[in-house]
Amino acid sequence: MLGIGTVPNPDATGDWLWRMGTGPGLNGLEKVNQNYVRRALNLVRGFDFTLDIDATQIVTEKQDALITAAM
């Protein structure tokens, strides 16, 4: 939707943030995040969303698992 080729997994991002601390790297990541959020929201104007700040995705390789979708 946003034209992002690849995104680092959460572990890699967390490791990078841990190494960088609260310096310019964190400020840069914040600006990138704001840019992508702004672009995404502009693409879906007119829809309501719920922000779930505690969302967790558990990726498995279980073949008989069912896909869940937000309503």
Image: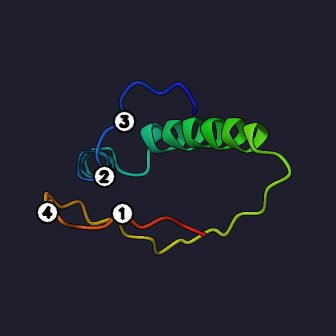
Q: CA distance from mark 4 to mark 2?
A: 21 Å
Q: Quadrant of residue 58?
A: bottom left
Q: Quadrant of residue 8?
A: top left
Amino acid type for the residue under numbered disc 2: Pro
Q: Which of marks 2 and 4 precedes in the sequence? A: 2
The 10 Å Cα crowd at callout 3, few under 14, some 14 to 19, many 20 or more, is few
The residue sitting at the front extreme is 64
Give residue 32's mark. Answer: none
The one of 29 and 1 positioned closer to us in this rendering = 1
55 sits left or right of 6 in the view: right
Give residue 7's mark. Answer: 3
Q: Quadrant of the C terminus?
A: bottom right
3 or 1: mark nearer the eye: 1
Residue at 24%, 45% (x, y): give it.
12
Secondary structure, mark 4, is: loop
List the residue tagged with mark 4: 62
Secondary structure, mark 2, is: helix
41 sits left or right of 21 in the view: right
List the residue tagged with mark 2: 10
Q: CA distance from mark 3 to mark 1?
A: 22 Å
Q: Which of marks 2 and 1 precedes in the sequence? A: 2
Q: CA distance from mark 1 to mark 4?
A: 11 Å
- Residue 68 is situated, as x and y percent measured from the top left of the image, at 41, 67
Secondary structure, mark 1, is: loop
The 10 Å Cα crowd at callout 1, few under 14, some 14 to 19, many 20 or more, is few
Residue at 40%, 24% (x, y): give it.
5
List the residue tagged with mark 1: 67
The one of 18 and 60 positioned closer to us in this rendering = 60
